Each structure stands twice: as structure tokens, then as C-alpha cells.
Image (cartoon, rainbow, N blue to C red):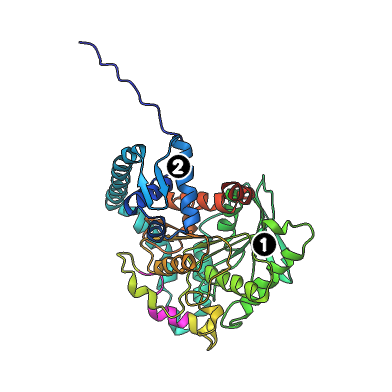
Amino acid sequence: MGDATVLAIQPAPDAIELRHLRAFVAVAEELNFSRAAARLYVSQPALSRQISALERLVGCALLRRSTHGVELTLAGDALLSRAGRLISDLDHAVAATRSVGGELAEQLTRLWATFVDVNATDGNIRGVRAAVEELHAKFPPPSEVQIAPTTVGGVPALRSIPPDGTGAPMLFLHGGGHIAGSAYGYRHLAGALAMVARRPVLTPDFRLAPEHPFPAALDDATNAYLALLDDEAVDTDDLVVAGDSSGGGLLMSLLLALRGSGRPLPQRALLMCPWLDLTGAGQEHQATDAPPIVTPEQVAWLAGMYAAGRPDDPLLSPLTADLSGLPPLLVQGGTGDNLVHDAKLLVQRAVEAGVDASLDLYPVPTHDFHLFWTFLPEAVDALQRAGEFLGADAGRARADAG
């Protein structure tokens, strides 16, 4: 008997993404958009857009909305069982892969080792700064990106220009625990953001604690942003901002300060593994198998130098501040990051305040995993997603979707 002929099912559209299926399964299981949005840490409008996009790609209605609630169509019922199995199988596949792929976790641990081994609490500021620069020096910026020194709002900065860059510059605030990090060291991540977003990236060298405690860094970030806002060559309707780790905390301070002063806000903001809770209390909510990059004692030491005796200032406590009126937020975190609770709580409270905020979690065993985009697949995925959100044409796409 000859080989059996197998009829191939028409492949699903390439544009269908896992987030579309997760959104659909959440709504189908909850039969309530509000509960599903809270479960996924996204706003209801963002969730509705994902469901509408999936229905458009599949080519039929999956959910029936009425004044009585939400119910599945026959097509939706057919998809639910299969999508649920697909997501479950994928999650188990990733977990199994990670269980036998410990060498990746070991590599991440080795990369952080120099920084972690520095006893920051004994006042070794110079050692911490050297360790941060040593870590970043392991990763060159993309060769296609042109990098040049500049000044923005009186603040020294580096401009990263991709080969096909269009749109207004992105303002990127780097991490480093508020006491370390530099525009030069962060060239590799700024360059990656420039490539995926297809727009120039400005990385200001804002002042660092303890020599310059709060609000020095916020003043520098504000001056840089306002300089872009006042630049006639910049399309102010296309301004976007981003920050990683402590730079994410500084970014939230910037947004709150701009809102408080009545200044125009950026169109969108990206926060990568943000450190927002200067008390360190959130770490107790996140037990991980990976060693912490910063211990509660180190968090307290860093916060003490940066906050300068003002930990209760609303600009320093975004997790307790009024978040209403902020622009759309994309928050990304690692499931194995001992600071991931900050990301989860920020999105939860932003959504409660009516902000279009969403949380993307990636199965990585470390903090600030975006730094390792040259070899970490999850970092590449996260940056590609960030590029879609912050890209030069993202505003138009979001407007069309709305």
C-alpha cells in the first residue's frame, strides 16, 4: 500500500498572535470583558481591540455581545477548546525547555555576577558604577545605528539614529539604580530600540545620586523632554518615551510631573522591568528561584541616597499616586524578576484609573532582561513588541484601531 495522501489544512493567518488567543480565552472563560481585562492587566478598550483584531483575522464572529452579557458563538465555542489546549501546550513546552536549558539562566547569572558581588551597602559607589559599565560593555550597539553626542535641554545626551528612522525622537531614560548607568553604556539597548521603533532615540546623561539626589534626575529628564516639545522640527504629536529598571521609575516621575504642570504628555510610554517601589516591600510578594539582582537591604540603601529623605513625595511613589490622565502604557516584566511585582501593581492601578495600560510578562529568570537582546529570545520578542507600540507609525495604527 502506498503512502497515504495527507490533505493539509489551510494555515492560520500569520498575523494571529498569542496575545490575541490569550485575550479571547480570558473573555470566553470569564464571559465578562471587565473581569477578563483585570485578569490580563489590560484596559477594556485594549482588550476589545485584540478581540476585534482576532475576529477580523479569523473571518467570523467569536463572541456575541448584548445588554445581557457576553456569550460564545458556535465558532467561538469551536475555537475555545482548541485555543485553550494550544496555550496550555505552549506554556508547558516553554517550562520544559527552561528546565533542561539551565545554561541560559547560568549565563544570565554570570553576566550579573560582577554587579551583584559589589557590596553596594558599604558605600562602594565607584565599584557599583564600574560594575554596571562592565556589564554593558559586553554588548555592542547594532552596527547599522549611527550614534552621536548631542545636548538636549542643556543635558548631555547620545542620539541613536537607525538607517530608516522616521518620526519624532524617543526619549529613553536608562536604569542603574539611580546611582549608576550612562548614555554611553546603554548604547546597545538604545540602538535596539531605535531599530525596532524605526525612530531616533535620545538618551540623556541625567545626574546621578548620591552627588545629585532627587529631583536632579527628574529636572534633567524634564528639561530634555521640554526641549523636544519646543523643537519646531519635532512632531510633538508623535513624542514617545521609554525607560528601564530605575529609569522606568524616573519615567513615571516625569509623566506625573508633566501632568501636574499642565504640560503636554507624550503619546505613549514603555516601561521595561520598572523599579517603582523604593521601600522594597514588593519583593516579598515575588519569590523566585533566581538570585535577586538587588536585595531589600540594597533597595533601601539605593532609595535612601536617591530620595534624599523624601520617600513620601508623590513623584517618588507612582504606585500610590493618582495615575489618571496618563498616556497609554506598555509595561514589560520577567516572571523570574524579584521586582516584577512593581510592574504588575502599576498596570493594575493604571487600569483602575482608566489608563490604557497593558502588561507583557516573559518567562525569564532575571531583572532587566531587555539588556540581553543579543542572545535572549524573550528579549528580542519584547523589543519587537515595544517597537510595534512605540514605532513611528504606531500612533496612526492605534487611531485606526480605535
Is the stretch drawn in magenta largely helix, strand or loop? helix
Q: Which residues are magenta?
A: 292-302
According to the picture, the residue beneath numbered tag 1 turns out to be 158
CB of mark 2 within 8 Å of CB of mark 1? no
Q: Is residue 302 above or below residue 225?
A: below
- Type of amino acid under label 2: Leu
In the displayed structure, 63 sits above or below 154; it is above
Is residue 370 at all visible to an observer of this figure?
Answer: yes
Q: Is residue 329 above or below residue 48?
A: below
Residue at 53 percent of width and 77 percent of height: 126
Quadrant for residue 240, please give it: bottom right
Given the current orientation, which residue lies at the most extreme bottom position?
Answer: 309
Q: Position of residue 243 (x, y in %)?
A: 55, 64
User: Which residue extends farthest top?
Assistant: 1
- SS at mark 2? helix
Crowdedness of circle 1 by 10 Å Cα count: few (<14), some, many (20+)? many
Looking at numbered disc 1 in the image, what kind of residue is underneath it?
Leu
Residue 15 visible to the viewer: no
